[in-house]
Amino acid sequence: MALSIKEMREKIDSGSVSSEELFTESVNLAKKYQDKYNPFVTIIDKYEIDKSSDSNLSGIPYALKDNISTKGILTTASSNILKNYVPVYDATIYKKLKEAGAVLMGKTVLDELAMGGTGTTGHTGVVKNPWNSERLIGGSSAGSAASVALGIVPFAIGSDTGDSIRKPAAYGGVVGFKPTYGRISRYGLFAFASSLDHLGVFARNTYDVAMVMNVIKGHDERDMTSLPDDDKNYLDTIDNEVAGKKLFYIKEILDNSDNDKELAKVIDNFSMVIKKCESLGIEVCEESIDKDLLLALYPTYMSISCAEVTSNDANLTGIHFGVRGEGNTPEEIIKDARTKGFSELIKRRFVLGSYILQKENQEKLFLNACRIRRMVVDKINDLFKKYDGLIMPAASGIAPKFGEGTDKLSDKYLMLDNHLVIGNFGGFPSITIPSGFVDDMPLGINITGRVCEDDVVLNMAYKLENTMDYVNQVAKDGEIDV
Ligand code: GLN
């Protein structure tokens, strides 16, 4: 049985198991599952620990997404252009975990350069869903989600620019949390879209997420968007009463006037969750938001993120680091490196981004997208005057099968599969917790709260998850089908 962080802590402290034994077991599981599910770019089998720490995480094995800089350890961002890149510095989050005595056992696969939501575009191949290997786990933090769902590690670190922690968490039946923007330093995270990028945590319960958050949050002068410390211990308030809290959901996003059968199952599950909220004394109300604004979420996200990533990834030339191209001039060398180093999907985003950033298009495309972002955030902040948070299904259904197409222009896709970007637009803390099953595949529910109220979001999620039977679940396929 896969142990939670809390259980590992108790066992290490009582002397019934050593941290090295836990590490070895984690690495052995990783090796066992790697062929079938492919969560790792690198499995680290050297046990290295800073023993001086008395942190809760001391001796606990974990995994990091492979777009987080680790000195001396291959860090590829799952892209061919970085397939040989060994960083010369540590990301702040890694440094903090190391100082806390947590033990890194692997670097996990992502969608190339964190762009995408399928877990199928990394240069080392597709990540499969541990609940059913015919289905995807989602992305971009695919390997982090899968390694936690498989019970290889009790927690893993991911990044989230649009939904990359909170969507795969739903597909994998685990918890995924993205805190307030600036709460965790981004120093050493390979930038995708800097104004939307967040680091965050996967675990199998919310208590464990809070334990990790206590270690990795905090001000960092190396990240100019880093917030001042909030001086909170998230475990102190995690079990507070939640009676009297108020949440809302957005009516237009759950509209099922087409009688879509899959959507009906998601809405059924959501109704069950609302009842659980009410049993805790949380009031859940329906609110309306202009449908045009909701339909604009995805295009707005794409316009801003593609523009930002085109600029951010301009440093991937193969000249200073990464795989070098061939040619006689610097231009030829860069062109060759970028042509060979990026997949078609990435190139398409760079083309979009370059177009959006062209002088004549900036006002109409980029700045308008920024205005729409502001309108969305203003609307949500306005509702947050009345409510403690927004509650919604995390996705429009269970994890899709490989190759299963989605109608990307349908209202359902545009709204229900993309509303999680609201959390990135406003930098709001946002968590997905498991809420049930459809066809033996997990579903997740998402709660998004006010900026700087990470503790409140964790408290509500903790109370809610404990009214349901999906705490600490490990993927079934992982146990029986390897
Ligand atoms: N799926 C979204 C995208 O394709 C989000 C990715 C992310 O959050 N890193 O860009």
Image (cartoon, rainbow, N blue to C red):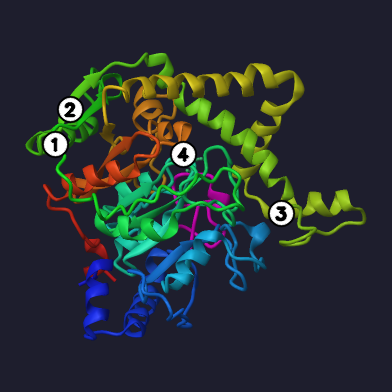
Q: Which residue is mark 4?
A: 162
The three-letter code of the residue at mark 1 reads Cys
Residue count near mark 4 (Cα–Cα under 10 Å), binned few <14, some 14–19, many ≥20 = many
Q: Residue at coordinates 45% horizontally, 49% vertically from top-left?
A: 229
- Of residues 439 and 338, the one nearer the viewer is 338
Place of residue 136 in the rendered image (x, y in percent of width and height, measured from the top left): 37, 51
Q: Secondary structure at mark 2?
A: strand
User: Residue 284, labelled with which disc?
Assistant: 2
Question: Which of the two marks, 2 or 3, is nearer to us in this view?
Answer: 2
Question: Which of the two marks, 2 or 4, is nearer to us in this view?
Answer: 2
**Quadrant in which the N terminus is drawn:** bottom left
Q: Earlier in the sequence, mark 3 or mark 4?
A: 4
Place of residue 31 in the rendered image (x, y in percent of width and height, measured from the top left): 40, 76
Q: Which residue is mark 1?
A: 277
Q: Secondary structure at mark 3?
A: helix
Read off the magenta span: 108-128
CB atoms of marks 1 and 3 within 8 Å:
no
Res. 215 in view: yes
The number of numbered discs placed on residues in the rendered structure image is 4
CB atoms of marks 4 and 1 within 8 Å:
no
